[in-house]
Amino acid sequence: MIVLIPAFEPGAHLAPLTRRLRESDVTLDVLVVDDGSGAAFAAVFDEVRRAGAHVVQYSHNRGKGAAMKTGIRDVLEQWPGHDVITADADGQHTVADILRVADELRADRAAGKSVLLLGCRDFVGDVPLRSRVGNDVSRGLFRVAAGWSASDTQTGLRGLPSDMLPWLLEVPGDRFEYETEMLLRLRGAGYRAREIAIETVYLEQNESSHFRPIADSLRVTLPMLLFAGSSLIAFALDTVALLIFAAVLSPWLGSWLAVSIVGARVLSASANFWVNRRFVFAQRGRRQAGRHAVRYAILAIALLASNIVWMSALTDLGMSLIAAKIMTETVLFITSYHVQRRFVFGGKMSVRPSDARPTSQDRQTAQPSTVPEQLAAPSLQNVR
């Protein structure tokens, strides 16, 4: 089993953490990815090597997500079949909690389960304001975007089953948003998550953390915000068209509502499809345009039927047309987002160029000869 630690300008906690992990469980290998910390932190990583860790270095900062993917690739190549525990370099995760996640991974493997383990903090006691606010913001936005709840979306302590690692390389994101993108796409990929309670630890009020609560939370939820803007434009276009069609058709058609709804929805849906495909979900190639259009049409028909049923029912109960429209669209908004993200514009993702393996000038494996012999012993390759 491998403990993967992405590190950018780490403090003095990293080497002692590595040493205690090796002393507590010799079956754990520790892989540290230096995410471009620079020469000023060379002594820290030298100490980490002496503590028994494998160290991979970048010449410049590429982001936590990119560092995690580099570590995962190395695990797949050097320790195939091994599970991975990710931990932060800032001292937030205790050795006891890391070992608890390791034990849970082993138990899941013995039971034939493949579940993402999340070491979740309870955020009680003396928690820095930036961390409390950041988690509250991320948790609320995540619930809206993902459709399920996680008590600690920012946790860096995670247990990754070996069979999940190839999929994790396909998850987009180079920085802090990668960890949340992992959770957003988890269920769509057919996986589940399970939470494990861990200790809430903040050293020096978490000053070593590079997470920006508002900015990085907005990066995570940018697709949802763009989708909301696109939906608002479509809603305005649909509403105006509905009122116009209703006013024009009502003198000639007794049952004008359904016809007006259909006409308005065709107009607004065409505009919405183009905006969502190009700007929200960044699908601009022509090769899959037909498939996306067919899937979108299926969704549009389903939403249209729901729209007619809900609006007809609400107006029959005496609600005004505008009020019924607002209530109906609010109910269908979240459903539409999730279906478009997972079904209409979803599917297997390609790894972006920015996620590709760093060049030889950018990535260095530091002093492999200093790794203790027992870490590379063949017998450990079968330890999960």
Image (cartoon, grey):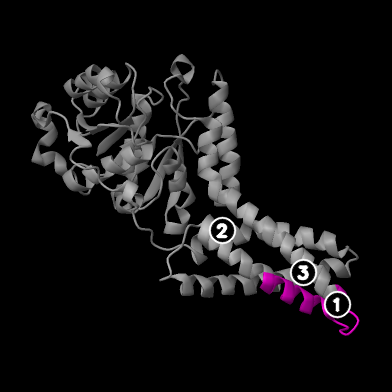
Q: Is residue 24 above or below residue 180?
A: above
Q: Is residue 180 above or below residue 310?
A: above
Instruction: Depth check: give the residue in front, 209 or 287.
Output: 287
- The label shown at residue 248 is 1
- The label shown at residue 39 is none
Sooner in the amino-acid sequence: mark 2 or mark 1: 1
- Whether residue 252 appears in magenta in the rendering, the answer is yes
Range of residues picked out in magenta:
247-267
Sooner in the amino-acid sequence: mark 3 or mark 1: 3
Name the residue located 39 percent from the left edge and 34 percent from the top edge: 157
Name the residue located 88 percent from the left edge and 63 percent from the top edge: 320
Crowding at dot 2, Cα within 10 Å, few <14 / some 14-19 / many 20+, comes out as some
Quarter of the picture containing the N terminus is top left
Q: Is residue 108 above or below residue 67?
A: below
Residue on which the image places disc 2: 338
| CB-based contact (under 8 Å), mark 3 and mark 1 | no
Sooner in the amino-acid sequence: mark 2 or mark 3: 3
Crowding at dot 1, Cα within 10 Å, few <14 / some 14-19 / many 20+, comes out as few
Where residue 354 sits: x, y (%)? 33, 46
Instruction: Choose mark 2 or mark 3, whichever is in front.
Output: 3
- The label shown at residue 241 is 3
Where residue 370 sits: x, y (%)? 11, 26
| CB-based contact (under 8 Å), mark 2 and mark 1 | no
Name the residue located 86 percent from the left edge and 84 percent from the top edge: 253
